[in-house]
Image (cartoon, grey):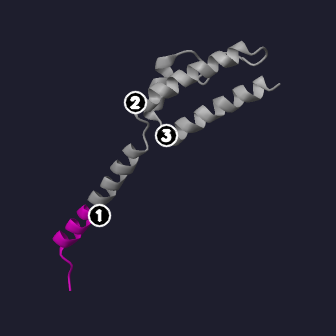
Amino acid sequence: MRRSFTNVTVANLMALSVASSVCLVFGTANAAEPVYCVQYAWLALHEVKANMATPGCFKGFDHRWNLNFQGHYDWCLTATVAAVNAERDYRRMRVAQCQAR
């Protein structure tokens, strides 16, 4: 017996629709929110200033260690919450390690 092209197409479209919905829901659910990113950017500036104020700690400006609020904020908006938290935790750890010397 020959399968109907219409049945296969409808089944494929339904599966694609479900998969797309799952991607959209989980993709946006992981993105950092603007309010969270404002807090992240202010904390990044605070940590850079703490790093600069500790003798021997500051090694120069780069993507992580800079005083560009908008740059930190914009990056945060494009990153997942997990990536933002990892970056914040890394910077916090490095400042604490350096100040403990």
- 67 lies left or right of 90: left
Quadrant of res 58: top right
Amino acid marked by disc 3: Val
- The percent position of residue 17, horizontal first and vertical second, equals 27, 58
In which quadrant is the N terminus drawn?
bottom left
2 or 1: mark nearer the eye: 2
- Which residue is farthest bottom? 1
Task: Give how far apart the Cα atoms at labels 2 and 1 are.
Answer: 33 Å
Q: Label 2 belongs to which residue?
A: 34
- The percent position of residue 74, horizontal first and vertical second, equals 44, 25
Is tag 1's residue or tag 3's residue first in the polypeptide sequence?
1
At x 49% / y 27%, what residue is drawn? 39
Task: Give how far apart the Cα atoms at labels 2 and 3 are.
Answer: 11 Å
For label 3, the crowd category at 10 Å Cα-Cα, with few meaning under 14, some 14 to 19 and many 20 or more, is: some
Q: Label 3 belongs to which residue?
A: 81
At x 69% / y 19%, what residue is drawn? 51
Q: Is residue 3 magenta?
A: yes
- The percent position of residue 64, horizontal first and vertical second, equals 60, 24
- The percent position of residue 61, horizontal first and vertical second, equals 64, 16
Q: Label 1 belongs to which residue?
A: 15
- 6 lies left or right of 89: left
At x 29% / y 64%, what residue is drawn? 15
Is tag 2's residue or tag 3's residue first in the polypeptide sequence?
2
Task: In the rendered view, tell whether residue 23 sits above or below residue 67.
Answer: below
Q: Do the residues labelled 2 and 1 touch (CB within 8 Å)?
A: no
Numbered disc 3: secondary structure: helix
**Which stretch appears magenta?**
1-14
